[in-house]
Image (cartoon, rainbow, N blue to C red):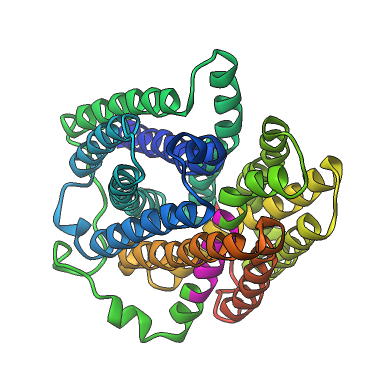
């Protein structure tokens, strides 16, 4: 069982690394993608909206129905489908083709997230917060690698299409690994209730005030992460006249902060408690968001990005693991709810920033990031009222 758990955990960790790389990649290559397909700022906003709609759809379906399938076999199938989608997107010549492909990307990616969260939460119930933090650390490691991957690919005179093809090949290998695991008869722990293969209910979960607060916080989380992730490079390039390649490197401080936070946050739980730690991270996140907008210069922007990443990185796994501690049997629904709320936040910021930038420029529209950071801070304090005071650690 130990070897089986190791391989399954490794599969999910590698998968989250690739998904993190892929998801942040779109914002990193957005300036070149927009020029290649002659997309306006508003069309770029619709691009992120379409991806978010696909993510919401996948999160809803995944939260309700993944229980009905073999998790590993479904994960293998989704990784294979995602690889095909990336190859097709790398061949698009018109914006409507891009929108169709990005919807499929968001849809299948979201179900993979739900499977990953549920598997890790069940396989490591004795140290859920730490392992979910490490899983999201791998996701953030992928987001950290994305800017450097693009810079390296551009040095070789390739373009954004080649980065998608490279990642499609990586997802194909991931699918083969997952399929191999299905042949090893890996056992995944079932939830405590009987009838584990029936669909779950979002309505029952949202009847509890704690999970309404969770939804509000996850909305803010998605808005902040993807607001900065999708628009910072464009903001720094267009509004602050920073070279695109240098802006990508400055943005890497945000993803680096996310990586450090997700790697280290679980070790602070015994010292501070989950409730207090969540509040500290929320305040740190808001401080970074304000610094990015109010300060100028590459050094100041790098510090702001680092603070934002350090605060934001630990919030997602801490929110979700705390929620699963409150109701472990509804893990898929809680993961789905988190993805739906986060994707809605991404929708609002993606489309809202694009439309705002169309009328008043990205320099003004980037105020959206500090605004949603304030929303997240308040929502995190609200949810912290329901967090169990006893930490769940290894």
User: Could you tell me residue 144's position as x and y percent?
Assistant: 60, 36
User: Could you tell me residue 220's position as x and y percent?
Assistant: 56, 68
Is 215 rendered above or below residue 70? below
Residue extending farthest top:
156
Task: Specify the quadrant that holds the N terminus.
Answer: top left
For residue 3, say whether it is visible.
yes
| Residue in view at x 51 percent, y 37 percent | 35
Q: Going by the image, does 304 lie left or right of 184?
A: right
Give whichever of 315, 188 is nearer the camera.
Answer: 315
Give whichever of 174, 244 is nearer the camera.
Answer: 244
User: Could you tell me residue 265's position as x and y percent?
Assistant: 65, 52
Is 107 rendered above or below residue 253? below
User: Could you tell me residue 386's position as x and y percent?
Assistant: 54, 80
For residue 392, say whether it is visible.
no
| Residue in view at x 66 percent, y 64 percent | 360
Give whichever of 166, 176 is nearer the camera.
Answer: 166
Magenta stretch secondary structure, dominant: helix
Q: Going by the image, does 135 lie left or right of 183?
A: right
| Residue in view at x 86 percent, y 44 percent | 297
Q: From which residue to which does the magenta span run?
A: 216-226
């Amino acid at each position: 069982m130990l070897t089986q758990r190791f391989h399954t955990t490794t599969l999910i960790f590698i998968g989250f690394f690739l998904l993190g790389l892929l998801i942040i990649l779109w914002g990193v290559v957005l300036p070149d993608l927009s020029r290649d397909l002659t997309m306006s700022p508003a069309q770029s906003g619709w691009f992120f909206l379409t991806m978010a709609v696909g993510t919401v759809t996948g999160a809803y379906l995944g939260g309700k129905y993944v229980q009905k399938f073999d998790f590993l076999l479904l994960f293998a199938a989704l990784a294979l489908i995602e690889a095909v989608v990336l190859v097709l997107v790398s061949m698009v010549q018109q914006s409507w083709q891009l929108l169709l492909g990005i919807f499929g990307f968001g849809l299948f990616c979201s179900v993979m997230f739900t499977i990953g969260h549920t598997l890790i939460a069940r396989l490591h119930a004795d140290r859920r917060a730490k392992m979910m933090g490490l899983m999201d650390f791998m996701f953030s490691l992928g987001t950290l690698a994305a800017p450097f991957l693009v810079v390296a690919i551009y040095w070789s005179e390739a373009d954004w299409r080649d980065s998608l093809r490279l990642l499609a090949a990586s997802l194909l290998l991931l699918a083969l690994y997952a399929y191999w695991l299905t042949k090893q008869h890996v056992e995944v722990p079932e939830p405590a209730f009987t009838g584990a293969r029936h669909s779950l209910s979002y309505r029952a979960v949202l009847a509890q005030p704690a999970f309404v607060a969770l939804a509000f916080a996850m909305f803010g989380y998605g808005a902040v992460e993807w607001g900065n992730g999708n628009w910072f490079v464009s903001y720094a390039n267009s509004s602050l006249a920073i070279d695109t390649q240098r802006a990508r490197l400055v943005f890497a401080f945000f993803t680096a902060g996310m990586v450090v936070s997700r790697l280290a946050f679980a070790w602070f739980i015994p010292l501070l408690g989950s409730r207090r730690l969540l509040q500290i991270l929320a305040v740190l996140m808001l401080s970074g968001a304000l610094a990015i907008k109010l300060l100028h210069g590459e050094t100041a922007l790098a510090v702001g990005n680092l603070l934002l990443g350090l605060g934001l990185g630990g919030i997602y796994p801490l929110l979700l693991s705390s929620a699963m501690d409150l109701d472990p049997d509804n893990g898929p629904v809680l993961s789905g709810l988190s993805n739906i709320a986060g994707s809605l936040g991404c929708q609002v910021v993606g489309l809202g920033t694009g439309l705002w930038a169309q009328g008043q420029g990205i320099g003004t529209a980037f105020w959206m990031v500090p605004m949603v950071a304030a929303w997240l801070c308040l929502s995190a304090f609200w949810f912290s009222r329901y967090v169990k005071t006893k930490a769940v650690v290894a």
